[in-house]
Image (cartoon, rainbow, N blue to C red):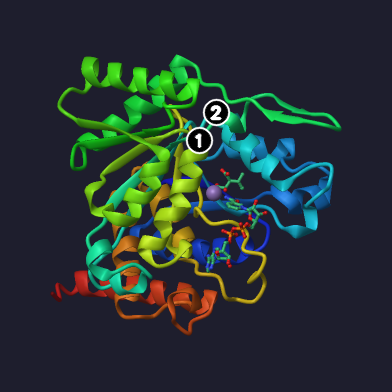
Amino acid sequence: IQTYKIVILPGDGVGPEVTAAARDVLNVIADFYGHRFEFSEHLIGGAAIDATGDPLPPETVEACLASHGVLLGAVGGPKWEGGKRRPEEGLLNIRKAMGLFANLRPLQVSPVMAHRSPLKKEIVEGVDLIVFRELTGGVYFGEKVRTDTMASDLCVYSVEEIERVTRAAFRIALQRRGKVTSVDKANVMETSRLWREVVTRIHAEEFPQVQLEHALVDSMAMHLIRKPREYDVILTENMFGDILSDEISVLGGSIGLLPSASLGSGGPGLFEPIHGSAPDIAGRDLANPVGTILSAAMLLRHGLGLDDEASSIEAAVAAVLAAGATTADLGGELGTRAAGEAIIDAIRAIHWAAAHRVQ
Ligand code: NAD
Ligand code: IPM
Ligand code: MN
């Protein structure tokens, strides 16, 4: 019986609530499929600042690097604003320390969920895209300067950083509908002009069978709302990917639904919902746990190679959402815990049906 070491980083705000729900789901999967998941929880973000003064204690980094995969809730909140250390530093530094340069943020809008979006059903129904965000470069990691009278954030990309994330995005496109939309601001930014050159060259030399188009980020923000079904893989730099991924969450009806996988070249990955610590609803059993539970499914698939296990979580989530058993963000009445339990019940039902060959 194989043992997988899974590190859980609950973090702040709703983080502990949504990771607890996902952990319960993973325990049920372990029972059904005969795996052993060895969980250990570690400090990150504001919780780590409070306990140690450091948003990313060294022992957290060690545990993550020695694991098979990391599941993170969220970091940040008003409590730590204006302090010397920021919770967000912890998240940025663990991404960097684990070498996680590619962040995958998939979104599918099924016909039964399409009416949950504030956009028209016919616009969002059938959306199936993935934001492929560069995660360890750009303006997030360039030199920062602050004096009394000015501030600056440097945006830097090397050819090698663009090449590796581009190759990863083209490979994913080959397993999907074969289309990549590379998003930049090449009419203004030098990093974007380099980005566009490198993506164009990698496409021509290594992936000519993929359909490639370039888009400027401002008009892309508009097209994503107008005709989101046209997109397959959206490849972009760190900051644009951050912004566009919150935008696409509206197509699915709630930011609470979207998972993500952050991957490097080998080594463990980090899996987290795209939302933040949601201070406005934290500690009240109101947060939607689905984004974190789907992140746990991505951990199983991309991190541990457990495809069937991941698919059974995804099928259970789809069934529960289709039945309208949702948290308040989607108009339902369930709390975080009850929503997690509904998904666990659905996993049990799916397995019972499979074991008894019920169609
Ligand atoms: P947020 O994503 O936390 O919340 C935005 C809105 O979406 C809020 O109204 C919130 O209630 C709602 N929401 C978010 N997740 C939800 C869920 N699971 N279920 C239901 N509703 C949900 O963004 P924000 O308010 O701008 O940021 C709050 C804090 O979180 C900040 O400190 C920010 O830095 C941090 N943050 C962390 C991460 C992360 O850890 N990966 C991501 C984004 C923001
Ligand atoms: C995200 C968040 C983070 C980011 C913040 C909290 C540092 O917004 O994961 O989307 O900007 O990457
Ligand atoms: Mn974000």
Is 41 situated left or right of 33 in this image?
right
Q: How many marks?
A: 2
Element marked by disc 1: helix
Q: Position of residue 67 (x, y in %)?
A: 54, 40
Frontmost residue, 217 versus 32: 217
Mark 1, ligand 2, within 8 Å: the answer is yes
**Residue at image x 60%, y 67%?**
17
Quadrant assignment for the C terminus: bottom left
- Looking at the image, which residue sits at the far bottom? 333
Q: Amino acid type of disc 2?
A: Gly
Residue 138: assigned label: 2
Q: Is residue 27 visible?
A: no
Q: Position of residue 106 (x, y in %)?
A: 36, 50
Contact flag, marks 1 and 2 (Cβ < 8 Å): yes
Q: Position of residue 346 (x, y in %)?
A: 33, 74
- Other-residue count near label 2 (Cα within 10 Å), few / some / many at <14 / 14–19 / ≥20: many
Q: Which residue is mark 1?
A: 238
